């Protein structure tokens, strides 16, 4: 995922109404905003895109873990572990965490 100008502006100036064309702001409406947020500069927008990308990239491990966790039938694994005095669920979770470290 690559954050775009729209997401950067929305992050910098929540609740504003704006439109963009060819990666440039063409209209800016502050009537819905309680605070006085000024229109961000091109540099501020570029920096915010970079920041949002870093945040997204920093969560790659969490997305990878979630995809693996979703493949497990965790409730059944925990129940079976309790009944059988095993640790298959804990072992599976630890393997996923080891494969996708923070």
Image (cartoon, rainbow, N blue to C red):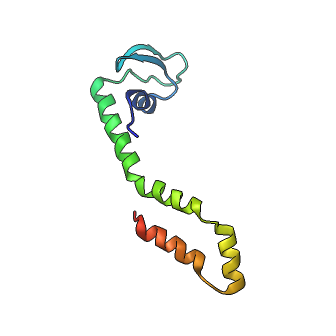
Percent coordinates x, y for residue 18 in the rendering = 46, 18
The residue depicted at 55 percent of the width and 19 percent of the height is 32
Q: Position of residue 22 (x, y in %)?
A: 35, 17
Give the tally of numbered discs.
Answer: 0
Seen at 40% across and 65% down, the residue is 101
Q: Residue at x 38, y 20 (%)?
A: 39
Query: Where 55 sits versus 3, above or below?
Result: below
Rendered image quadrant of residue 72: bottom right
Q: Position of residue 73 (x, y in %)?
A: 64, 66
Q: Determine the residue positioned at 30% across, 35% down.
A: 47
Q: Where does the C terminus fall, quadrant-wise?
A: bottom left
Q: Tell me the quarter of the picture where residue 49 sits.
A: top left
- In the picture shown, does residue 49 fall above or below 16? below
In front: 9, or 4?
A: 4
* Lateral position of residue 14 relative to residue 77, left or right: left
Q: As rendered, which of 77 and 7 lies closer to the eye?
A: 77
């Amino acid at each position: 995922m690559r954050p775009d100008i729209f997401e950067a502006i929305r992050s910098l100036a929540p609740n504003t109404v704006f439109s963009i064309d060819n990666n440039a702001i063409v209209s800016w409406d502050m009537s819905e905003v309680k605070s006085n947020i000024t229109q961000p500069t091109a540099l501020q927008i570029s920096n915010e895109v970079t920041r949002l990308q870093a945040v997204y990239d920093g969560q790659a491990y969490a997305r990878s873990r979630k995809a693996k966790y979703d493949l497990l039938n965790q409730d059944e694994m925990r129940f079976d572990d309790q009944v059988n005095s095993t640790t298959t669920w804990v072992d599976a979770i630890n393997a996923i965490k080891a494969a996708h470290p923070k």
